[in-house]
Image (tube, rainbow, N blue to C red):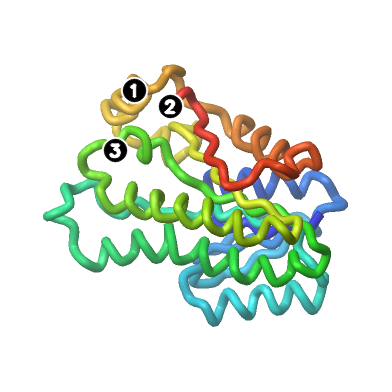
């Protein structure tokens, strides 16, 4: 299978790129604003601004010319650039939240669709957050950008299903990544307290869920959001 995964320089995105590249029959096209140290023959990295339409189009054009089609798009990349109350967040930070968390997945989904139409099949996985359920103070623009992406996910799913393509969202709770584990412990404890499962999730929770969503058995699952961690 051919995968495009965004945000593969670290965290969940890097884990997913390594996980799916373990199957040598898969080709993984990863991308991020920074470099990636994954060294596998079936992993290809694009260092691009993921919010810039021109660079995204060029990336997908190279994939089309070299490989012809795409099976799976995983829109993992995301940012939460401020934990301040809404009236304190600079306009530049608001724009960055929306460009990375909403605009980028939309642009990638539109380009991916063109390649998936070649074989009338495909899976698009977007990433949400438990913040969409909890709405904690200080996350106004992060939460709003993820809610916007979920609205897009639901509508886009209806628009593309007749072509054999599904679009769903995964919304993890706190996951055991370096970024999460280095965060403020009081904040982590508060977030976990709100969930049914009181400990951080595993990266395998995410890959197991994606494995199911991209399997033939999930061909009728589309426009859905799956919360992980008992949110």
| Residue 146 point in image, percent of width and height | 40, 50
**151 left or right, relative to 75:** left
Q: Nearer the N terminus, badge 1 or badge 3?
A: 3
Q: Which mark is residue 194?
A: 1
Residue positioned 21% across, 66% down in the render: 91
Q: Which mark is residue 135?
A: 3
* Depth check, front residue: 183 or 98: 98
Report which residue position mark 2 lands on.
231
Residue reaching furthest right? 25
What crowding class fits label 3: few (fewer than 14 Cα within 10 Å), some (14-19), or many (20 or more)?
A: few
**2 left or right, relative to 106:** right
**Image quadrant containing the N terminus:** bottom right
| Residue 14 point in image, percent of width and height | 60, 49
Residue positioned 81% across, 75% down in the render: 66
How far apart are the two marked residues, 1 and 2, measured between alpha carbons?
A: 7 Å
Q: Secondary structure at mark 1?
A: loop
């Amino acid at each position: 299978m051919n995968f495009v995964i965004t945000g593969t320089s670290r965290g969940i995105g890097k884990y997913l790129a390594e996980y799916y590249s373990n199957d040598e029959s898969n080709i993984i096209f990863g991308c991020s604003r920074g470099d990636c140290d994954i060294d596998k023959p079936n992993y290809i990295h694009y260092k691009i601004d993921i919010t810039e339409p021109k660079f995204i189009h060029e990336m997908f054009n190279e994939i089309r010319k070299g490989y012809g089609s795409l099976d799976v798009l995983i829109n993992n990349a995301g940012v939460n650039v401020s934990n301040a109350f809404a009236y304190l967040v600079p306009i530049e930070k608001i724009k960055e939240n929306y460009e990375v968390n909403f605009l980028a997945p939309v642009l990638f989904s539109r380009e991916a669709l063109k390649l998936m139409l070649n074989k009338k099949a495909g899976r698009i996985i977007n990433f949400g957050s438990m913040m969409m359920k909890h709405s904690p103070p200080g996350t106004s623009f992060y939460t709003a950008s993820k809610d916007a992406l979920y609205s897009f996910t639901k509508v886009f799913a209806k628009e593309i299903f007749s072509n054999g393509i599904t679009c769903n969202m995964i919304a993890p709770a706190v996951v055991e990544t370096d970024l999460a584990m280095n965060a403020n412990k009081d904040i982590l404890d508060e977030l976990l307290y709100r969930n049914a499962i009181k400990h951080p999730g595993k990266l395998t929770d995410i890959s197991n869920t994606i494995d199911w969503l991209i399997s033939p058995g999930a061909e009728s699952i589309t426009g859905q959001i799956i919360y992980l961690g008992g949110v």
